[in-house]
Image (cartoon, grey):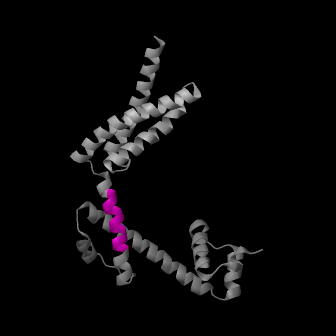
Amino acid sequence: MNIYKNFNEEELVDAYIQWIDNSGKIGKELEEVLIERGNIDIIKAKANHKKLIIKEKGRIAFEINKMVLQNKSLEEIDEKISSELLEKDELSYFILEKYIVFAHNKKDSEVDKDTIYKSIIGLAVASIAGFLFLLLILFIIKGFIFYLLVPTYIVCYFIIKMITGKSRSNLAVFISTFLATVFSALLVFLVFKSSIN
C-alpha cells in the first residue's frame, strides 16, 4: 500500500523535500504518486520555492536577532529588513513574531542588579523550601536516595523563577537554583547528623 496516495499537495511537497534533503532523490512510492497525478514538475517547483522561503526566513531571523542584541526598536528593524520572496504583510508579521521572541530571550538572559537581588532572596527561600521538601520525602521513604535531588532542584527552580521572573537560561537564576539545591541537601545532612549525635 502506497502511503502517499492519501497525501494532499502540501504534504507531497513536504515529503518531496524530506526525500531530497535526506537521500538526494525521491522514493519510488512517492515518484509513482507524483507521476500518477501528473504534477511532478509542480511539486518540484513548489518544493524549491518552499526551501527558498525557509532559507530566507532563516536569514531574516538572524538579522532580527542581531538587531535586537544591538537594542534596535521594532520600527527600526521593520524599516531596515526587506525581502524579495515574502509579501510585505507576511514579512511584517514574521518580523513582529521573531522580534517578540528574541526581545524576550534577551531580557530573560540579562543579569542586572534587580535579578541578582531577587536571585539572592530566591536562593534563601528556595533553600528553605528545598530543605523542607527533602526532609518530608526522607521521612516518608525513611532513607536518602541521590535521585531525590532532581525534584528538589525542580522545586528550587520554580521558587526562584517565581521570585525573579526569569528562566534558567539566566545565569543568576541557574547558579541560585544549583546553590539552593546544594544548601537544601547540606541542611538535611546537618539535621540528620545532629539528630544522630
For the point 68% across and 72% down, the residue is 27
Q: Main secondary structure of the magenta part?
A: helix
The C terminus lies in quadrant: top left
For the point 36% across and 48% down, the residue is 162
The residue positioned farthest toward the bottom in the image shown? 38
Residue 10: x and y in percent read: 58, 79
Q: Is residue 168 left or right of residue 11?
A: left
For the point 60% across and 77% down, the residue is 11
Q: Is residue 39 above or below residue 52?
A: below
Q: Nearer the viewer, residue 58 or 40?
A: 58
Q: Is residue 185 above or below residue 85?
A: above
For the point 31% across and 43% down, the residue is 172
Residue 58 inside the magenta-drawn segment: no
Residue 69: x and y in percent read: 27, 60
Q: Nearer the viewer, residue 156 or 18?
A: 156
Q: Which residues are magenta?
A: 94-105
Q: Is residue 109 visible?
A: yes
Q: Is residue 183 left or right of residue 77?
A: right
The N terminus lies in quadrant: bottom right
Q: Is residue 160 above or below residue 83?
A: above
Count of labels in the image: 0
Residue 36: x and y in percent read: 71, 86
| Quarter assignment of residue 38 | bottom right
Residue 96 inside the magenta-drawn segment: yes
